[in-house]
Image: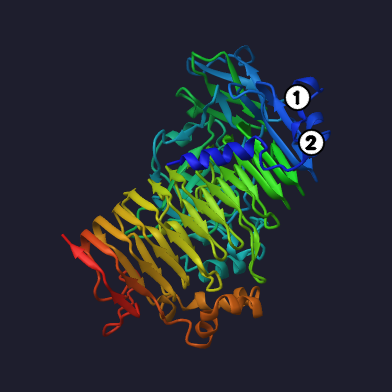
Amino acid sequence: MISKFSIISALCVATGLFLSSPALARKVKVSDVPSLRAAVENAQSGDTLLLKRGVYRLDSPIRIEGKSGIAIMPASPRHKVKITGSKKIRRSEFKRLKGVPRGVRVLDITALGVKGPTINGHGHPSVPAWSFLFAGNRLFHLASWPEDGFLPIDSVLVTGISLRFDGSMMSRVAPSADMSLRTSATANAGIDPRGDSSHGPGFGTIRFREDRPLEWSDPTVGFVNGVFRYGWAEEIVPIKSVNPDRTLEVEDTTMYGFEVKPGERFQKWRVLNIPEEVDKTMEYSIDEMGSRLVAALPRWTRSFEVSVLEEPLLVLDGCERVSVSSIEFFASRGDGVVLSSCSDVGMHGCVFHGLGHKAVTIDAACRRCGLSSCTVFDVAAGGVILDGGDRKNIVRGDNFVSDCVLHDFNLVEKSSCPAVSMKGLGNRVSRCEIFNSATQAILMNGNDQVIEWCDIHHVCQDVEDCGAIYYGRNPSERGGIIRGNHFHDIDVPWNVRAVYHDDGACACLVEGNLFERISSPPVQIGGGSDIIYRNNVFRDLPCAAIKIDARLLTWGRDRYFDFPDKVALVDGPAFREHYPEFASYWEEDPCTPRRNVLEDNTFINVKWVFDKVVWADHDYNDIIEGEANFFSSMHGNSISR
């Protein structure tokens, strides 16, 4: 996966060989100064900061501002250096309580700064997660009921008011919101509000059949987690009450409200953070109001870590030619590293895990910054934000994620929090392995983005109607290249893709990829134009290889109405010169797919390969008479069984 060349390149950058300053020879041992913070603040151009082995605990971020030409690395390749936003807890600080299962202990968190769960998920602001608990490097899990899996939503009494209709997407709708607002909101969302009149306005009420929730002493410390209406919208919402009539009411808004959709299996729920459900080793709950943490401790650990720092561990602002190498960023509630307005800043051979938000954020003002040979896992809300570049003026960011391994990056937020979220123009993800995620591997927004030579598997395991690589709903996002990747073993019993050009997505070259062992059609083109599939191999598929439609002419027409405003943000002379086909796209009917190409692809042991394009969609009952071919060119393709 990781080439010798990439490793050598990373080591060269890590050791400062890219620095041309004559001061390169100056090496500062952090053990010789009062602290890591002091060493960073006093660093001069050309300095190499050599960190002694050990754990660096932070109560505020390390900030590097306006520095150039410095390197930060362990003093020896044998030294393990860890930077953390956690506090160490001795086993003796956990106390026994009567009436709790054997092995369960209680920790007083009054003075620790520990934070409990909060509302989170699809449509809600992405915020740092609650405090994580660790035994060594092993992560505890928030207690859940049922112990394994979810329950189906039995019935809905109050659908709840959606965030979408409260006017801000940020504020909460008061429980006393009048019925006229509620009726209008649910009607616009296509939700049947029956049953609301008997219960009055509220955030949502569902009915359950089991006895267990009636036994909880204080269910209001718990949170309902699940998918409440659509398969791509997973949320965590606080509980208001569990009632004797076996109803559960939430006390905050959800994105789409609660609904049972006949024939679908994605409406599901569970309850998190109930202290009585802490009954299995490596489980815990946090009662922030009661100032206690309840945990089932493993016998083999004498000390523990709890994450408390909400801010990033390391912030680089306005820096040039800085490298950070072979550092472990661990156990913080916020991001691992944030790069702002930097150029030529690299993270090399670093490990990011146990983090309560993102591993690394690279902002829009960065150029030629990124990660190489890094590992990202056990993070709450996606791996890397890879921004950079000016879309309107066609200025490249050239930021990158290369030769990295990213997995298990959805501990808290499972909807649209991928391993890499690409934005801006001219950035790259290459030679990475991405696996074991609830949602997308890569969310590809922006222009001229490149995704190449990656191994992507076992993704999209807990969300529906998404893709391992996903983009859409904006025809000005053009110039994407997806090449040489291996998509495989995406085997889930619901609707997911390997590459999803959603809702009018356009202008992408997909070439030289291998698609195999994927349970749904690995490619979906949702009404867009200028998409080219060339020299790909589709193998061992129990389904169609490619699905294409013209949804903007039928049920997806409403998506089109947002296009002009999105296009206006980037349209201009530079943009049109760079994308000459864009002018003809906009002057012609943009709702009709045009100039799509399918050529020189190979189909082996595929259940169905279309030689006729079908755009009838049984889910929406849109059956168009006659046949329409939305590939303008289909030639050189081979089929074998």
Which of marks 1 and 2 precedes in the sequence? 2
Element under disc 1: helix
Give whichever of 35, 11 is nearer the camera: 11
Q: Nearer the viewer, residue 69 or 154?
A: 69
Q: Is residue 13 above or below residue 621?
A: above
35, above or below 13, in the image: above
Q: Coloured how?
A: rainbow
Can the viewer see residue 14 in this picture?
A: yes
Tell me if 27 is positioned left or right of 401 in this view.
Answer: right
The amino acid marked with disc number 1 is Val
Expressed as whole percent of the image width and height from the top left, the position of residue 150 reads 40, 42
Point out the image quarter for the N terminus. top left
Q: Is residue 35 above or below residue 449?
A: above
Q: Quadrant of the C terminus?
A: bottom left
- Mark yes or no: residue 159 visible: no
Circle on res. 30: 1
* Image mark for residue 565: none
**Residue ID for mark 2:** 23
Q: Residues within 10 Å of mark 1 (few under 14, many from 20)?
A: many
Q: Is residue 29 above or below residue 637?
A: above
Q: Residue furthest front?
A: 22
**Quadrant in which residue 72 is drawn:** top right
Give coordinates of residue 582: x percent, y percent. Answer: 53, 79
How many numbered dots are placed on residues in this image? Answer: 2
**CA distance for labels 2 and 1:** 17 Å
